[in-house]
Amino acid sequence: MYKTFLLSLTLLTLTACAKEVPAQKAPVKEELKCQTKPIQPLRIIDKPIDFGKERIAMTKEYIQSHYGKRVKNIEITPKIIVLHWTAEMSFEKSFARLKPQKLFTDRKDIAKASLLNVSSQFLVARDGTIYRLMPENWMARHVIGLNYSSIGVENVGGKGNQVDDLTPAQRASNIALIKYLKAKHPSIEYLIGHHEYRQMEKTSLWLEKDQGYRTVKSDPGAKFMSDMRKATQHLHLKTPPKAQ
């Protein structure tokens, strides 16, 4: 009985208007239509990282020094979805890495480029729960050369930065998130894995001015990206140019 009540309540929630239609003084000829937008079925939990004045200022400086652009704000037009893994099995530790405004001292591999901390618009937990860490159209630091046109999706996992151990729940959530992002941001053209980022140097979206600023990445791997592309092929998202 209780399950039936919950199901009925869910169906009513998905089909009803968010606002009550005011009573009409006179009969209307045309049927009144719901004016609210359909409820988005994808569940996303907002869990903001620290993104105050200092991080915004550092992001603007990053854009200027690495991309040669002077900007008034850090808004982007998304063109790429970049999928990652955190190389950390704990959600709490993964989130703690992204939360501060400044880079951790152990990230000597990228510290010379900027002390702006790494970030990502989304973080997907092992159970598939999707967390939004910052506005989707603000620039995050998650991929060299492409931050100014990309939305980053981090997945908790990739133990030791070696093996694709991402769960079936994470795979399902990534597929749903890709569909959601493409529908919300029609400007998105590409779907890539972090390990494929250097192949994008051949495109007009690559902006990095520092020829010596590159890192080697293995996440999230060929199998994961193959799974994502098969499930979202109807979106006609481009793959990066083939490596020579």
Image (cartoon, rainbow, N blue to C red):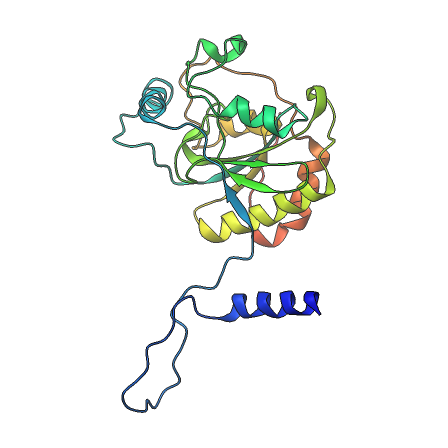
Q: Is residue 39 above or below residue 214?
A: below
Whether residue 212 is visible, yes or no, is: no
- Residue at image position (50%, 31%) is 120
Question: Which picture quadrant has residue 234?
Answer: bottom right
Is 57 on the left or on the right of 163, as rendered?
left
Q: Is residue 1 above or below residue 151?
A: below
Whether residue 100 is visible, yes or no, is: yes
- Residue at image position (45%, 20%) is 117
Quadrant location of the N terminus?
Answer: bottom right
**Residue 188, percent across and down?**
47, 45
Q: Nearer the viewer, residue 19 or 178?
A: 19
Question: Which picture quadrant has residue 239?
Answer: top right
**Residue 189, percent across and down?**
49, 44
**Residue 90, percent across and down?**
65, 27
Count up the numbered dots. 0
- Residue at image position (52%, 70%) is 15
- Residue at image position (43%, 35%) is 149
Q: Nearer the viewer, residue 126 or 68?
A: 126
Residue at far front of view: 2
**Residue 173, percent across and down?**
63, 45
Quadrant location of the C terminus?
Answer: top right
Q: Nearer the viewer, residue 105 or 214?
A: 105
